[in-house]
Amino acid sequence: QTVVTQEPSLTVSPGGTVTLTCASSTGAVTGSYYPNWFQQNPGQTPRALIYSTSNKHSWTPARFSGSLLGGKAALTLSGAQPEDEAEYYCLLYCGGAWVFGGGTKLTVL
Amino acid sequence: QVQLQESGPGLVKPSQTLSLTCTVSGGSISSDSYYWNWIRQPAGKGLEWIGLIYTSGSTNYNPSLKSRVTISLDTSKNQFSLKVNSVTAADTAVYYCAREYSLWGKGTTVTVSS
């Protein structure tokens, strides 16, 4: 079964920019993997941020963007805010099944 | 607006069957071309996709759970359901239902214990 890998943890300064990545054990991530990104705060339901690589939901803050970068899916946060400190998960469509990454704990410090 | 609500027993004995229902309100489960997911999260761990059902009734499952999982649709009740057979402590988790991946229920905690 496909393994989806994310950075376990990242730190960004307030106002700074950070990129989270999402890799597939089967090879380069392309648009056919329909990358999704989610934000989850402790004790809360995950909130969808990005779908199909780079599409934002109506509620997604403009400072979040999605892309493909170096064979991985990427979530870039530009102008980090304290409220962006959370766990972030990616989700890939891999051969008929969806697979979540292990999550990235983002600290804004 | 459309809302999803999970329901079912919070405690299941080992080797028994876990059964959950997701009730969709504010819209028809069979309208448009949405698919409906079950996702779970053990305490302190990451998200795990369990499977999905299309409005046609066809399903896709996580290969690691496929032998124990059934997802079904009841359009008359505007619900879809999850059954997991032969549960163990490893199935203890918060279970979420979701419309595709943009709209989620609040989740329900299921504990497997005797």
Image (spheres, coloured by chain):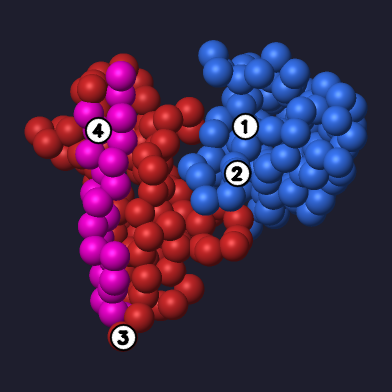
Chain colours: A blue, B red
* Chain of residue at mark 4: B
| Left or right of residue B107, residue A65 in this image | right
Amino acid found under the numbered disc labelled 1: Asn
Q: Quadrant of residue B93?
A: bottom left
Crowding at label 1, few (<14), some or many (≥20) Cα neighbours within 10 Å?
Answer: many
Position of B26 relative to B8 (above/below): above
**Numbered badge on residue A41:** 2
Q: Are marks 3 and 4 on the same chain?
A: yes
* Chain of residue at mark 2: A
Give the percent coordinates (x, y) of residue B15: 31, 80
| Left or right of residue A87, residue A17 in this image | right
Per the image, is B22 magenta? yes
Position of A108 relative to B50 (above/below): above
Give the percent coordinates (x, y) of residue A82: 75, 33
**Numbered badge on residue B16:** none
* Chain of residue at mark 3: B
Label 4 element class: strand
Quadrant location of the N terminus of chain A in the rendered image: bottom right
